[in-house]
Image (cartoon, grey):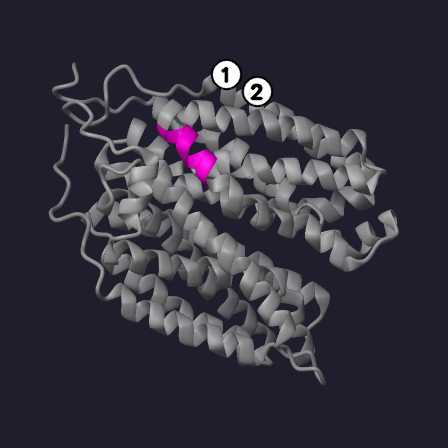
């Protein structure tokens, strides 16, 4: 077996699993404080807003760090980039445990974790292209993207339980040790390339990341896709942040808001597994982007207006299933339509769109909520209109895979 035939190694799944582990832990550390905001505010004798900044700083720091991360992935490969991010995650994760009682040092550590994140989560499509044949790449990207959903879900469930059982400082220590273990596993297992590429032939011409970014911003299809990600990821970040505020004016409790968030993420996890597999199976991307954008609209409308708990929970599941399944397919689609631009560049730019819009949407939803009732119905209705507009843009996207992938023995 040589490069003229290509070979898919079983070891590719270990590389992907090691990546999912460190990326998932990174996301746990991002959202650590959100499910225990009140407890953390009391522990540090500060406001809820200051605790919220511990999570929001990830979105802010991503903006200046996205280009260095894309450059490193392109020049040195995903193992160097994710490895650097993993070491930073371990160091600053442990620092949160060591200095757990000092809010200033915990905040500095959180900023360090935020700086590590782009080096990790920007590598998903690069790993897929290095180790997986074309017919499996949306599936691999979907499984890699699962970390972005599994991490917050684990944090939402585990953080309150740990705080109640072992205490606030001990919880931070446990997460720091988990980060160190995940970093070790990745550095031990990950390899940049398999001995033989997964697809026949030598790698084609590659464009330097800066030139690639300039090319991307001149292409209409890429600009349309960036706009879709701007709306979709911003919507996810904003709804996740304000989920309790969204449902409270209609009489739902904090626990019921938690159920809604859990079902939304569970739906997203299932969607991120099922939809990319189907996309790979029929070798098409565009139809699934359209299905995702259309399918999430009923869920969003239900979350916006319903006063029935069963309908609310069902709407959250539908919303998460379709919205979060669009992510991995969109990332892989971008990698395919922008070749020979490095995969890390397209991946990090799309994530950048979500960080910028997340900040804007979070602040706007808070600013425009009803002063009398606290309702965010108007903001959610506006976001629904934006999703409909995104569906319209998606109609003009070209298909990235022109024919079914060839079967291999």
| Residue 130, quarter of the rendered image | top left
How far across and how far down the image is residue 111, in percent? 66, 40
Residue 306 visible to the viewer: no
In this view, 264 is above or below 10: below
In this view, 63 is above or below 292: above
The residue drawn where x is 23% and y is 66% is 395
Most foreground residue, 147 or 335: 335
* SS assignment at label 1: helix
Residue 234 visible to the viewer: yes
Residue 14 within the segment the image draws in magenta:
no
How far across and how far down the image is residue 108, in percent? 72, 38
Image-based side of 49 in relation to 358, left or right: right
Image-based side of 264 in relation to 154, left or right: left
Image-based side of 95 in relation to 287, left or right: right
Q: State the predominant SS element of the stretch in magenta.
A: helix
Label 2: few (<14), some (14–19) or many (≥20) C-alpha neighbours in 10 Å: some
In this view, 91 is above or below 115: above
Label 1: few (<14), some (14–19) or many (≥20) C-alpha neighbours in 10 Å: few
* SS assignment at label 2: helix
Disc 2 and disc 1: Cα gap in Å? 6 Å
Residues drawn in magenta: 67-74
The residue drawn where x is 80% and y is 50% is 40
The residue drawn where x is 55% and y is 63% is 360
Whether the residues at callouts 2 and 1 have beta carbons within 8 Å, the answer is yes
Most foreground residue, 371 or 124: 371
| Residue 95, quarter of the rendered image | top right
- Write down the residue under mark 2: 184
- Write down the residue under mark 1: 188
Quadrant housing the C terminus: top left
């Amino acid at each position: 077996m040589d490069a003229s035939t290509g070979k898919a190694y079983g070891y590719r799944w270990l590389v992907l699993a090691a990546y999912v582990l460190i990326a998932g832990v990174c996301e746990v550390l991002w959202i650590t404080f959100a499910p225990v905001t009140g407890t953390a505010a009391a522990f540090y004798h500060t406001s809820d807003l200051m605790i919220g900044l511990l999570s929001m700083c990830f979105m802010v720091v991503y903006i200046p760090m996205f280009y260095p991360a894309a450059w490193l992935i392109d020049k040195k490969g995903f193992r160097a980039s994710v490895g650097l991010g993993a070491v930073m995650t371990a160091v600053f994760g442990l620092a949160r445990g060591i200095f757990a009682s000092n809010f200033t040092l915990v905040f500095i550590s959180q900023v360090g974790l935020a700086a590590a994140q782009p080096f990790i989560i920007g590598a998903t499509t690069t790993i897929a292209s290095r180790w997986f044949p074309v017919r499996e790449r949306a599936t691999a990207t979907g499984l890699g993207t699962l970390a972005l959903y599994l991490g917050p879900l684990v944090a939402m469930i585990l953080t309150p339980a740990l705080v109640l059982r072992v205490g606030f400082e001990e919880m931070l220590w446990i997460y720091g040790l988990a980060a160190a273990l995940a970093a070790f596993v990745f550095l031990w297992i990950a390899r940049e390339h398999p001995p033989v590429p997964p697809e026949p032939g030598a790698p084609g011409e590659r464009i330097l990341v800066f030139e690639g970014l300039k090319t991307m911003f001149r292409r209409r299809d890429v600009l349309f896709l960036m706009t879709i990600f701007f709306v979709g990821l911003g919507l996810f970040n904003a709804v996740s942040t304000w989920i309790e505020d969204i449902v409270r004016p209609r009489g739902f409790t904090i626990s019921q808001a938690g159920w809604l968030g859990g079902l939304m993420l569970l739906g997203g996890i299932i969607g991120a597994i099922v939809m990319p597999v189907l996309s790979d199976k029929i070798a098409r991307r565009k139809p699934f982007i359209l299905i995702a954008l259309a399918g999430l609209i009923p869920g969003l409308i239900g979350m916006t207006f319903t006063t029935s708990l069963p309908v609310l929970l069902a709407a959250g599941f539908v919303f998460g299933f379709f919205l979060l399944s669009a992510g991995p397919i969109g990332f892989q689609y971008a990698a395919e339509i922008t070749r020979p631009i490095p995969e890390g560049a397209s991946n990090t730019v799309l994530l950048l769109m979500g960080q910028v819009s997340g900040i804007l949407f979070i602040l706007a939803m808070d600013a425009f909520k009803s002063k009398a009732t606290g309702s965010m119905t108007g903001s959610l209705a506006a976001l629904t209109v934006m999703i409909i507009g995104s569906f319209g843009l998606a109609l003009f996207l070209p298909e990235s895979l022109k024919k079914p992938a060839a079967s291999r023995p």
